[in-house]
Image (cartoon, rainbow, N blue to C red):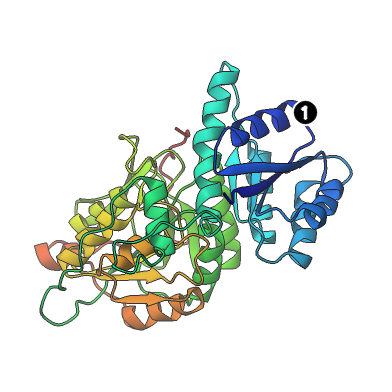
Amino acid sequence: MRRIRVLVVDDAVVVRRLVTDVLAADPDIEVVGIAANGRIALQKIAQLAPDLITLDIEMPEMDGLTTVTEIRKTWKTLPVIMFSTLTERGAQATMEALARGATDYVTKPANVGSVTVAQQRVRDDLIPRIKSLCAGVLPAATSATPGGAPASLADQLAKLAGTPPPRPPRPAPTGPPQSISIVAIGCSTGGPNALIEILPKLPADFPLPIVITQHMPPMFTKFLADRLSVMSRLAVHEATEGAVITPGVAWIAPGDHHLVLKAVGGRIIATLTQGPPENSCRPAVDVMMRSVVECYGPRVLSVILTGMGQDGLRGSEAVHDAGGSVFAQDEATSVVWGMPGFVARAGIASQVLPLDRIAQAIIDRVGTKPMTSPYAASRDLPLPAPRSASPSASPSGGTWQ
């Protein structure tokens, strides 16, 4: 049986042993080699033709950042998962690795108390990513069609996630399309680079607020927001408790906190909660989307980008059922067509688009005229004050699950 061939690259013997032992215990994965630095790894990629690489960041001779850069010169699509520390330095380096072409990342277990717990953390974090990124390598499940045709990639991912296929398509609410007052974006694996493709294309006078949930731990979301803010004409911030959601600003849910919008005194504000994870995620897209619908009703554009699992499906169903609009990234341009695949297959997406067309589609759907607050319009309350040049000074949240 064909198995996923993995090359493990780390200069620490203990870490290499931990990762190889965990991966080798899975019947779908074969560790075909190990390397102590990037220079050796480049040689072994050519020799062993792995399906995927796990790559440490800090190594002697050739570090992970340089290695990713060199890998992408020759192997454009080879999945590379960075193995990062949950530190400020590790978060910065991971953001740089993703910008240079790394596919995804996991954080190394730290202060977990035992080898058994460390192994379980690696097993839970790493193996699902490997199987999602290399789903095409595993034997295709057969569908229930008379001819037994191979299942689609989305079906295979659904099986790997242990979740049933989405419900059959259902009709959109009748009536003319609603004007849009907020854009809500959800993403996971491959999401940082997808956001880098979309947000810088939006104009400086974009008339609406944007809220984003990207599955990431603390510190990582702050550095992602900072990087996007530098690259974009919009202000991009990690969301803080009590921040007023105002036009022309994008807010990213902080790691280990759900981003929940609430209507308070005629304004929509951000609140951060540490409620239970949903879809094994905190922050979760579904939590954010439900709160957006509660505040804005049908005046919502949901955009579901590349990512593993099905977080965002139920939230997008709420947007659809309220009369809002839903976009999903297409399979060809997604790193993993899990989250957008579930949305597309549920029949609730008004458009399924390649990544390079999503920014323009958002602009076209939103239109060029600023929208008034739906909360104020529907309840005869005063409009929010114009946003200042700086983000809210409210205190921020901050630890990872």
In this view, the residue farthest toward the front is 147
User: Image point 55% across, 36% down: which residue?
Assistant: 26
Q: Residue at x 49, y 63 (%)?
A: 235
Q: In terms of depth relative to the viewer, which is nearer, 68 or 158?
A: 158
Based on the displayed image, in which of its 4 quarters is residue 315 positioned? Answer: bottom left
Tell me if residue 212 can be seen: no
The residue pinned by badge 1 equals 13
Pick whichever, 148 or 362, lies toward us. 148
Above or below, 401 against 251 in this view is above
- Determine the residue positioned at 37% across, 69% down: 328
Q: Is residue 24 left or right of residue 250?
A: right
Question: Can you give x and y, in whole percent of width and height, for residue 146 in the image?
Answer: 29, 68
How many numbered badges does the structure rendering display? Answer: 1
Q: Which secondary structure, mark 1? A: helix
Above or below, comparing residue 245 to residue 81 in the picture = below
Residue 311, position as x, y percentages in the image: 35, 52
